[in-house]
Amino acid sequence: MSRIDLNKKYNSECEKGCNKEERQKKAENDTCMMVKSQNDNLSVRCVGEWAEDKIYLLHQYFGIFAGGMKKKWPLNYIEICSGPGICINRQSGFEFDGTAISIIKHEQFQHINKAIFYDYDNNVVDTLNKRISHLNLSHKAIARYGDYNNPNSICAELKILGPNCLNLILIDPTDCSVPFSLIEKITATLKHVDLIINVATMTDFNRNIQMAFGDPKRAEKYIRFLGNGSYFSSSENIAYCANKNYPKLRESFRKHYAHSLENIGYKYFDFTSIRNYYDILFATSNPKGIEFWQKASKTIDSQGQRSLDFGI
Ligand SMILES: C[S@@+](CC[C@H](N)C(=O)[O-])C[C@H]1O[C@@H](n2cnc3c(N)ncnc32)[C@H](O)[C@@H]1O
């Protein structure tokens, strides 16, 4: 297991504790307009305290994956919803490396052939490219404009990676609006894919799922996410919904998603809950992949307790 240095630093420019309305005034797409990073004077993404746990888990898995597979496969790393590379915790005022920068600074990143980071916010893409360039890694890492609602354009680019590599893909949205067709298209394009997906099973899901059962327009988004409508037509789920049985509805949502993934070739799944905010889903067709993931996820529990310290 690797020790994590997320370059955590207190940023005195952060006013701390901004509520939703204040954030709407002071941030654009959660990029804070008031605060720049203490490290490089570029933009930071305003996040809740749970964001670090996801990065910790990703970092642990990445180390085991790249270290374990480097001699067996050429490896690529791809992120969809990359963010600008540095986050700031709005409760504590500490900034720290986000998913993209924590991966490209990882000691095992040397074993990656190509890393591509997609975001649909051009400012986020420019900022991340500047950070990649400061780290002298522009020859193998790049941030690109890409909208997950347009799988064809993302996959037209991913094609250049070829079908003979092992690809680790993180998809990190804030809600359940990533279409299943994106996963299908990526899998068909790249062939060998391990997936890590942030599934908003407690935020977006809790707020909207009950209304979606009675409202086909609202249900559309979740049907698109799951890849089909069987979740909403299941009589068991209709009964859970009537009884407001959210734990069972959530469990069934996870099962339906895993089932859709199974239909396109994924065999092993794991959902790791992050502080009751969201699930991190890992999916692979390789038994080694799930073994590595279980090793990585053992280092964190659902309350965000980490069994290894951050190197701060
Ligand atoms: C949760 S944040 C990512 C945080 C980042 N992965 C990290 O932890 O450092 C979600 C990102 O998704 C991007 N995003 C939202 N909708 C998108 C879409 N349709 N296609 C691509 N990116 C999108 C946002 O601009 C934002 O940067």
Image (cartoon, rainbow, N blue to C red):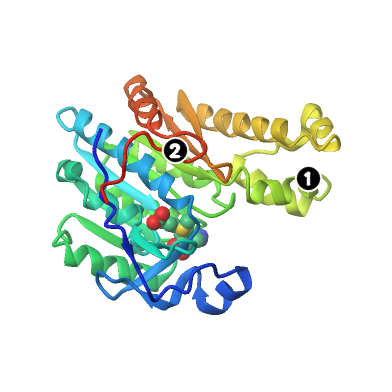
Q: Residues within 10 Å of mark 2 (few under 14, many from 20)?
A: few
Check the image and report above or below for 198 versus 294: below
Is residue 3 visible in the rendered structure shown here?
yes
User: What is the tally of numbered marks visible in this picture?
Assistant: 2
Q: Which mark is residue 305?
A: 2
Q: Residue at x 22, y 47 (%)?
A: 106
Q: Residue at x 51, y 39 (%)?
A: 303
Check the image and report above or below for 145 versus 268: below
Amino acid carrying label 2: it is: Gln
In the rendered image, the residue lying farthest to the right is 242
Q: Secondary structure at mark 2?
A: loop
Q: Residue at x 62, y 31 (%)?
A: 256
Residue 283's x, y, as percent? 44, 31
Q: Would residue 312 appear left or right of 139 to someone viewing this image?
A: right
Mark 2 and ligand 1: say if the CB distance to the nearest ligand atom is below 8 Å.
Answer: no
Q: Earlier in the sequence, mark 1 or mark 2?
A: 1
Residue 141's x, y, as percent? 22, 56
| Viewer-proximal residue among 88 and 82 | 88
Residue 249's x, y, as percent? 71, 34
In the rendered image, the residue lying farthest to the top is 287
Q: Secondary structure at mark 1?
A: helix
Check the image and report above or below for 262 versus 109: above
Amino acid carrying label 1: it is: Gln
Q: Nearer the viewer, mark 1 or mark 2?
A: 2
Spatial separation of the CA atoms under disc 1 and disc 2: 31 Å
Cβ atoms at labels 1 and 2 below 8 Å apart:
no
| Viewer-proximal residue among 105 and 133 | 105
**Residue 187 lies in quadrant:** top left
Q: Would residue 274 appear left or right of 73 to someone viewing this image?
A: right
The quarter of the rendered structure image containing the N terminus is: top left
Mark 1 — residue?
210
Q: Residue at x 66, y 44 (%)?
A: 223
